[in-house]
Each structure stands twice: as C-alpha cells, then as structure tokens.
C-alpha cells in the first residue's frame, strides 16, 4: 500500500493505475491534527494486519534533485507503533524497513520541481498539476526518446533495518554493530512489561531516520549527468563567487561557458575521489563512471541532456561547454551535493 497525493488522481493517465495499485489518497493541504492522526493510525493498523507500505519518507518527492536528508518522522514512526501494538497483543510479527534508492539520467519534470524548490512552494504542493508530466503527449515523447537511447533506471534495495534502526541478519533477527543478536522487545519494556511511551518512541524513530539517511548516501548510484552537472555548476559558481546562490541563478547573464580541457582535468580528479569512496562503500557508481574516461562520461551526459529539455542543460560547442538554464543545471548538480566533493580546476 502507499499514500498518493490527491492531486495525482486528477492528472491524465495516473488515476487508472493509482486505483489498481493499492494507493490511498493523501491531501497535503489538510493540516488538521485529527486528519493527520487518522492517516497515521490507518498506516499503523494496516501494518499490524501485515500489509506492506511504500512511501517517500520526506513526505513527497524531493524537489531539489538531491538526496533526501530531512525525513518526516510521522509516517515512519508508524512502524514502531505497529510493533508495540503487536507485542502488547501477544503477537510476534516482525517489522522491517527497507530503504530504496532510485536514480535515472533525466527527470521529466525537473524544471518545475527545481522552480518549486527555489520558490519554497513545495511545502504546499505535493503533485504539480501544470508541470511537464501532466501532458500525455510530452510523457510519450519523453519515454520514446529514452527507449531509443537504452536509458537505465538504477534501483538499489538497501540492507533491511528493524523499527529501531538496527541491522538484521539473514534470518531476520536484529543485530548490533558487532553482529550480535539483540532482544528488541527489551527496548519497549519497563519493569518487565511492554508499555507505550511517546517520548521513547520519538527517540527510536529519530535513530531509524538517521540510519535511513546514511543508507541513502551509501547506496545512491551516481550517473554521468549528475557528475557533469555537478562539476559544471561548481566551476561556474567559482566564476561568480561574490554572488549568493539565488542572485547567481536569477541575475547572471546566461549562457555561461567553460573551456573543455580544464573541465576534463577537473573531472578526472573528481572521478578519483568518487572511485575511492566507492571502494569504501560510501557511494555507488554506474559502470561508465567506474571504468570510463572523463571525455566518454561527458559525451554520455551531453547525449542525455540533449534528449528532452528545451534548453540543453549542458552543450558542447567546439572546445567550450555552455549552459543556458542555470536552474536545471543546479537541479542535476544537487545529487552529488551532500558528498562535499573537492573541485580542483
């Protein structure tokens, strides 16, 4: 089961699938405590009955194009609520949280998402009705172009966690960082009895959220478009270091350009850092980034960037690289932003 924004059911094509895939509606504009409490209780009770749930722990898709860092604890906390309720009822059902990462070279509605993020409108708009993905012809054209390029979607299922953020072994038993089994029922006992404790559960849910964020960082697959956009944006920002981000995006005269050879040199150094991180298990890279040279990676990114967006995110003209849409460049750049990579021109 999963919660889908009410607006999603008003978009072309989507209602047919939503109504058949276990979705229940969520109205993000409703903020009444009673409404939120009923949603949480519904999620907790269905978990108790053995229904799996799929949801964005940030409450919706992340608008910035980055990696989710700020998880909302309400729905996430229903896992622990269901666990406590089942134990109080004398049941031994186990509950697990499986973080999942999904990355792809292009995002259909990237322009609208990043505009929403920059305007801070994402707080009140769960699904954007007037974006690119609301037009069936645009969707079909986008899909056809991607299929012609053999575009991939990289999905990774991370190691499962228990409701407290502990890892589990192959039999589903909770283990500590040394691999020793843990009696998690003891976490919710007081003087030998299982009890409800909202403050205690909030601490455990926060701990679970931290482990999920860590899993996202370690298991996101970085693609050529992310690397090229990240490096291009960082180098362009260095040219306008005296301006803040919003002034740069709003007032800088575009297109801006970079010389090709220094860009490739900087990419080679950033690739070295990324590959070292991959060896330590701190990131995932698509095969091209694992073995390819900077020029091959750049050309692959340019091929994707030229597929759909009206103004190519990055394009090559001779021995220079140009960008005409700073917002889109910033959107694709953000995927690598949490890793704080060094830029050496």
Image (spheres, rainbow, N blue to C red):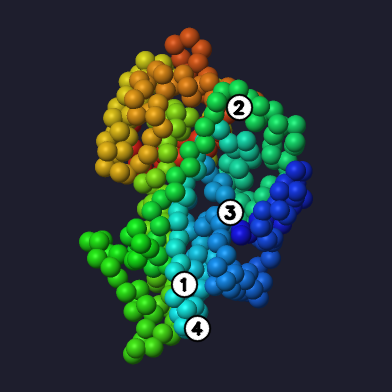
Contact (Cβ within 8 Å) of mark 4 with mark 1: no
Vertical order, 237 against 201 (above or below): above
In the image, farthest residue toward the bottom: 191
Q: Quadrant of the N terminus?
A: bottom right
Write down the residue under mark 3. Answer: 60
Q: Nearer the viewer, mark 4 or mark 3?
A: 4
Residue at coordinates 28% horizontally, 68% vertically from top-left? 181
Cα gap from disc 4 to disc 1, whole angstroms: 11 Å
In the image, farthest residue toward the top: 318
Answer left or right for 75 relative to 30.
left
Is residue 268 visible from the viewing direction of this image? yes
Write down the residue under mark 2. Answer: 147
Residue at coordinates 42% horizontally, 36% vertically from top-left? 222
- Return the mark for residue 264: none
Cα gap from disc 1 to disc 2, whole angstroms: 42 Å
- Considering only order in the chain, which callout, 3 or 4, is on the residue closer to the N terminus? 3
Give SS at disc 2.
Answer: helix
Answer left or right for 123 relative to 167.
right
Name the one closer to the observer, 102 or 332: 102
Write down the residue under mark 1. Answer: 93
- Considering only order in the chain, which callout, 2 or 1, is on the residue closer to the N terminus? 1
Residue 120 x/y as whole percent: 59, 50
Q: Nearer the viewer, mark 3 or mark 1?
A: 1
């Amino acid at each position: 089961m999963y919660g889908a924004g009410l607006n999603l059911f008003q978009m072309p094509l989507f209602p047919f699938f939503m109504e058949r895939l276990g979705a229940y509606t969520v109205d993000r504009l409703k903020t009444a405590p009673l409404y939120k409490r009923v949603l949480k209780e519904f999620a907790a009770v269905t978990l108790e009955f053995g229904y799996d749930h799929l949801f964005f722990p940030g409450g919706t898709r992340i608008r910035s194009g980055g990696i989710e860092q700020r998880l909302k604890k309400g729905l996430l906390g229903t896992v622990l609520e269901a666990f406590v309720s089942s134990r109080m009822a004398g049941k031994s059902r186990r509950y697990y949280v499986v973080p999942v990462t999904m990355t792809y070279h292009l995002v259909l509605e990237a322009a609208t998402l990043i505009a929403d993020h920059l305007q801070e409108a994402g707080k009140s708009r769960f699904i954007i009705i007037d974006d690119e993905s609301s037009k069936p012809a645009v969707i079909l054209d986008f899909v056809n172009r991607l299929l012609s390029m053999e575009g991939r979607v990289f999905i990774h299922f991370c190691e499962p966690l228990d409701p407290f953020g502990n890892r589990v072994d192959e039999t589903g038993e909770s283990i500590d960082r040394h691999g020793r089994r843990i009696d998690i029922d003891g976490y919710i006992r007081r003087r030998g009895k299982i009890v409800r404790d909202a403050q205690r559960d909030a601490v455990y849910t926060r701990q679970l959220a931290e482990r999920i964020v860590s899993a996202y960082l370690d298991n996101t697959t970085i693609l050529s478009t992310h690397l090229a956009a990240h490096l291009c944006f960082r180098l362009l920002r260095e040219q306008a270091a005296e301006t803040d981000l919003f002034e740069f995006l709003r007032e800088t005269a575009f297109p801006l350009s970079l010389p090709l050879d220094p860009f490739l040199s900087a990419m080679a150094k950033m690739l070295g850092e990324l590959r070292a991180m991959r060896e330590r298990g701190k990131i995932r890279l698509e095969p091209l980034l694992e073995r390819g040279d900077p020029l091959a990676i750049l050309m692959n990114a340019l091929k994707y960037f030229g597929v759909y967006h009206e103004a190519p995110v990055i394009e090559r003209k001779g021995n220079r690289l140009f960008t005409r849409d700073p917002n889109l460049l910033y959107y694709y750049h953000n995927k690598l932003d949490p890793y704080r990579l060094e830029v050496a021109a």
